Amino acid sequence: MNKRVATITFNPAYDLVGYTSDLQYGHINVVNTLGLHAGGKGINVAKILTSLGVDVTVFGFLGKENQEAFKSLFINTGIIDRFRMVEGHTRINVKLTTQQGKLTELNFSGFKITKNEWEDFATESFTFFSQFDMICVSGSLPEGLLISSFSEWMQQLCRSCPFIVFDSSRDALVAGIHTKPSLIKPNRHELEIWANRHLPTIKDVIATAYTLHHQGIEHVVVSLGDEGAIWINSNGAWIAKPPSCNVISTVGAGDAMVGGLMYGLLMKKSSEYTLRLATALAVLTVNQSNVGITNLAALYTMMERVDLCPYAMHKAGVKS
């Protein structure tokens, strides 16, 4: 593939992933450690795309004090590293999955970028971002990066690159949506925050996703956990429902879905194929403690098990 792809992760993290049968607040909890992984949303997306044979360049900021595992990851996977080093340490996030499949996250603080560090990155970024066919911007913003500065940068980025994928939350999600990227992938809770109301049914979710689509976002994908995902674009609405599976960790499942969506769009696959691939990647990810695909045969088998249909065919079974 001669397509050029980049991911941008402004606030990466070491993910300390664990499993516990039950989480008791205010008490000692025994946790089975599943791994400590160099990650962050854009880096996880890069892992998936690299597993599928796509060359990916990664950008963002890393703390000087604990950069080693990230550098090793990039070397071992062949990911092209363009991260900028800043003073301080990259944060550590604790991800605890319980027997019920629920994820509790403890996201610690990390480095703080200065105004000059951000301005240097923003200025330099537009000298090479126009060379990429697709760019994914995902994750939270680090301390020191103002929402207003990020929003202005996103507006310029959307004018510079033909296809922008955006996946974030809270204030950054709202700011990014205003710039009208090509594809967004909020989960249900994040979509509710944007809509400022509860979305109890699939019908509510689809109606809200269509609102975003009509506002100028070409592809709106909403991840629904074990209920699957919904994709709204000019071809209509598609609903994908995954098979039931054993949940080891949900960390990175949404990022795996984003990687699958990007791959399908890069390869000019149909919406049906792309959503089936993205959903299968998410399912395989929750069956392991880290993000990445090592068995393509298992991926193709899982794709066949994904239940996929247009919304019009699915309406009768949707709770409203």
Image (cartoon, rainbow, N blue to C red):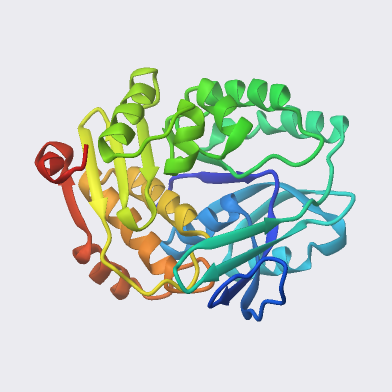
Percent coordinates x, y for residue 69 in the rendering: 73, 68
Whole-percent x, y for residue 151 in the image: 64, 23
90 to 244, vertically: above or below? above
Name the one closer to the observer, 157 or 21.
Answer: 21
Left/right placement of residue 167 relative to residue 106 reads: left
* Residue at the far top in the pictured view: 215
User: Please, which residue is most extreme toward the front here?
Assistant: 26
x, y percentage for residue 245?
33, 71
Residue 253 in the image: state x and y as whole percent.
Answer: 46, 59
Quadrant in which the C terminus appears: top left
Q: Quadrant of residue 30?
A: bottom right
Does 27 sit above or below residue 105? below
Q: Looking at the picture, tell me which residue is in the foreground, 311 or 193.
A: 193
Question: Image check: 209 left or right of 164?
Answer: left
Number of labels in the image equals: 0
Task: Name the foreground residue: 56 vs 218.
Answer: 218
Task: Relative to 290, say whether 8 is above or below.
Answer: above
Q: Is residue 164 visible?
A: no
Quarter occupied by residue 226: bottom left
Residue at x-position 78% and y-position 56%: 90
Between residues 173 and 69, which one lies in front from this camera angle?
173
What is the quadrant of residue 27 in the picture?
A: bottom right
Residue at the image position 46 percent from the left and 53 percent from the top: 254
Q: Residue at x 60, y 21 (%)?
A: 156
Residue drawn at 32 percent across, 61 percent down = 280
Residue 116 visible in the snapshot: yes
